[in-house]
Image (tube, grey):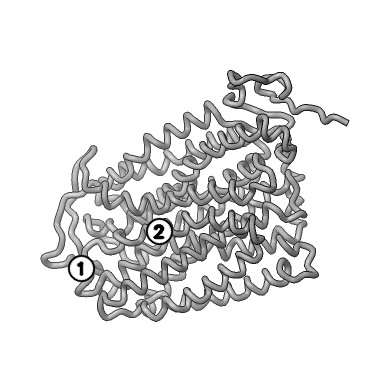
Amino acid sequence: MNRALPQDAASGETEGEKTGPADQSWLKPGWVEGWDPEDEEFWERRGKKIAWKNLLISIPALHFAFLVWLLWSAIVVNMNSVGFEFTVGELFWLTAIPGLTGPTLRIVHSFLPSILGGRVTHIISIGSLLIPMVWLFFAIQNVDTSWATFMMIGALAGFGGGNFASSMSNISSFFPRRQQGLALGLNAGLGNLGVSTVQLVTPLIIGVGIVGGAVVYREGKFIDGEWITTAGGVVKDVWLQSGLLIWIVPIVIVLIAATLFMNSLKSFSLPLKEQMEIFKLRNTWTMTWLYTMAFGSFIGYSAAFPLTIKLVYGGLDDAPDGLALQFAFLGPLVGSLIRPIGGWLSDKYTGAKVTLAAGIGLIISSLSVTAFTHPTSMDSFPYFLAIFLAMFFFTGLLNGSTFRMIGVIKQFNFRTRGPALGWTSAVAAYGAFIIPIVFKGAIERTGAPDQGLYGFVVFYAVSMVILWWFYLRKSSPEYGA
């Protein structure tokens, strides 16, 4: 029996009627009906073009979302140097607050694509990024702006964190099971690069006066919790607002692209009540735990890494000026680039096996780095940096492998897979709040993040037990995920 050909609501034509090299109907935005990526004939004829078109817009949209979400990790290390007077605790709170609001917004975003459609959800998501960016652009130019005001802006930066859930949920629905690891890995991996981008570009661009007045930058150190300007240190003019202005125009361009070209899938539409069924599935909760180990670690370390470098090594007599942002971007860069590899390896060897290997690596590296968190000179910094980069490497593998597991677990079907991906990413994103706050407490007490790292290692060890019990035992229903 011949299968009915899918019909595209945007054009009203069946697949069989769309022939010839001149056909450009796949470029049209709007709703698409009859979506079946598992049908190879449909996929090759039309589905692949639509799926990759949406992915190519989704990637920069998610890239800028992460950039806005982790923007504070690059801003706070410079604030006291230009005249603000915030304590260590206040700076860590500015870094952490987007990590509290972002995951909370992810819970909402988990279900939006199935209600509003992917296109409308992306338009709302991308447009919301402009709110904290524009406000911070003006606030950062006045050194009298209060810490409370910056906390409100930081909370709004959580818009960027929320977008991940809807983005991954939406993209998952466009691709067949056999390409879930690749598609989700590219979307998340290149999206995650927004963290590295903002940490790399910010120190370079703030020296350029694009618009507005300059402030005087003076290098300094934290001594007994107080900011002390370094005598004879770096003194230069900077424009912190330049580090914000350069992102506003590209965000607007991606917003226009989403409006003109993205699609929504009719077959993916699912009432909220039916989406709630995912909470009755055991795999929803086990994978939420495992993805929290993976992404929670990646995003939390990304947020805390610049300030941790500054506080642990920046106060040494032989520490170079601007140490934190010279190297901090490397962590999220490594983790982001390796994420698609984690998905690809999982397509080849199964996600559970890759998760086991990477989880063990994360445990070993998290313990090893504590040997270099009480420095007496910069001689130990290369070892500290190398091991921390190894930690990011393993979190990147884990991000790709665990999301691939969700994409192929049989208990998640075509319609529930997206909400499950969104929910797990929402809970995991609280790592962006938890890790900076845990590091804050540990550094304030002992001058090093060791106590926090020991606690995380216990969490990772429990995660390995859960992984083995549910996904690596041959008697497990999901063995081979």
- The quarter of the picture where the C terminus appears is bottom right
**Callout 2 environment at 10 Å: few (<14), some (14 to 19), or many (20+)?**
many
Horizontal arrangement in the rendering, residue 102 relative to residue 232 (left or right): right
Amino acid type at image mark 2:
Thr
- Dot 1 lies on which element? strand
In the image as oriented, which residue stretches furthest toward the left? 232
**Callout 1 environment at 10 Å: few (<14), some (14 to 19), or many (20+)?**
some
Q: Which numbered marker is on residue 95? A: 2
What distance separates the C-alpha of mark 2 from that of mark 1? 21 Å
The one nearer the camera, 258 or 78, is 258
Look at the picture and state if 101 lies above or below 293: above
Look at the picture and state if 342 lies above or below 132: below
- The residue under the point 30% across, 46% down is 243
- The residue under the point 52% across, 56% down is 339
Amino acid type at image mark 1:
Ile
Horizontal arrangement in the rendering, residue 400 relative to residue 196 (left or right): right
- The quarter of the picture where the N terminus appears is top right
Dividing the picture into quadrants, the one containing residue 463 is: bottom right
- Dot 2 lies on which element? helix
- The residue under the point 77% across, 27% down is 5
Horizontal arrangement in the rendering, residue 312 relative to residue 121 (left or right): left
In the image as oriented, which residue stretches furthest toward the right? 1
The one nearer the camera, 391 or 115, is 391
The one nearer the camera, 39 or 152, is 39
Position of residue 17 measured from the top left corner of the image (x, y, whole percent)? 71, 19
Position of residue 126 measured from the top left corner of the image (x, y, whole percent)? 49, 38
Position of residue 398 measured from the top left corner of the image (x, y, whole percent)? 56, 62
- Would you name the residue on which mark 1 appears? 228
Look at the picture and state if 167 lies above or below 292: above
Look at the picture and state if 134 lies above or below 475: above
